[in-house]
Image (cartoon, helix red, strand yellow):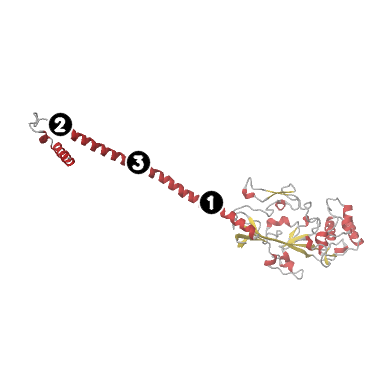
Amino acid sequence: MNPRDYRGQGAREPCVGSEYLSAANRARSWNYVKQKGVSMGLGLYDQDVYVVKTAGELLFDGYEDNMVLMGKQLFDASEVPFDRVGWFYTRNNSADLIGHYNVHTGVDDIFKIGSMAEWNYKPRTDFFAGHCGMLNGSAGEFYPPGLTKDVPIQLLYGQEEEVAGIRGYKYAGGPRTVDNGTQFPETACFSAGEIIPSGVLNISSCRFGTPVFMSFPHFYGADEYYLNQVEGLNPDKSKHQLYMTMEPTMGIPLDVAARFQLNIMLESHPNIALYEDVPRTFLPVLWFEQHVTMTPEFSGEIAQALSIPTTARICGIAMLIVGAILIAWTPISRLLAQKRRDAVKDNAGTGHQEKTLLQQNLTAAILVASAPEKDPKLGKTIAEAHPLIECKMVRLADSDNTKS
């Protein structure tokens, strides 16, 4: 919704005068004399239940009104912090009325990332009592990682969807989102004392006492009571449902459609002439949509980030396999090396034995050559007593003959 699209453009349309209704609603708890004073003030300026303005005036530009000027004179400036009337007047490119938000960064607890900690440096608001005034949920930019289908994020899980090639979980607003205690007793603190059918949320305290109620567009999902009061309503899920598609691993919004409708409650005020005969009616004023979808360029970066854990696991498994091979190869390589060393030692020992035996044979041959024919102790010749030496001698003799 771009305010420049509406500024000063369009035909003049009738709309409920919220400033008059706000004055009458605030006077409801006053005494009779003060209420009649408000009634006279409205009659003095010849006001009507409806005002006729352009869309730009009703939304962003605002318009001057004598009741606002009089209110600034009679009440404290903090109670009337504007000089014109407009639903979003002074809110364009301004944080003065929106306030300051503090959100968790996830440094201390990753599952708190994006959740709101304070608004205007307070952990709760003054708009609602009890737990309804607490700051719960996210500012919308970030959500905790590791989302699962069975854990709602203030919205209900619907289905899986693919946005720009990224798989995500789609959550949607349901009856509890805008309940006022009718279906869910724990949301009764949002009703501000108004007993009304389900499907609308009383946000009068957020609009300076103006009886404003929030619902889904065209009262989508609300009680039939509201649809029967106004003509031209046609709730359509595809057009009017609030939803958010989240990437569950990283908690990044992929597709968001925030759709809400502002409604004004008209009702009778016996002591204020302008509203003394008005039936209780919830009139839609406007509905808006903020739709954000993931672009293909950014989805590519998301896909790369999502692939990091898988890539890391593959690399980790590969490193484990390589490490196991290296660990197993170390004793095997040592065993093979030891076998090679043993083989070398065995070869060296065999050569030494052969050399020693040859030396012994030579020595024996010399002894035979120099010894007498018979051993005086044995009564035999050396050859008879030592046939092995004789064999060696013969072999040596054969070798000598061959050489000669």
238 and 384: which one is in front?
384
Q: Would you say 74 lies left or right of 403 here?
A: right
Q: How many marks?
A: 3
Residue picked out by circle 1: 312
Tell me which numbered mark, 1 or 3, is placed earlier along the sequence. Answer: 1
Taking 369 as reference, is 35 above or below it?
below
Residue displayed at 18% across by 32% down: 363
Residue picked out by circle 3: 338
Horizontal and vertical percent for residue 135? 70, 51
Q: Amino acid at mark 1?
A: Ala
**Dot 3 crowding, Cα within 10 Å, few <14, some 14–19, many 20+:** few
Horizontal and vertical percent for residue 102? 71, 48
Residue farthest toward the front in the current orientation of the protein: 404
**Dot 2 crowding, Cα within 10 Å, few <14, some 14–19, many 20+:** few
Q: Amino acid at mark 2?
A: Leu
Q: Nearer the viewer, mark 2 or mark 3?
A: 2
Horizontal and vertical percent for residue 327? 43, 45
CA–CA distance between discs 2 and 3? 43 Å
Residue displayed at 68% across by 57% down: 185
Residue picked out by circle 2: 367
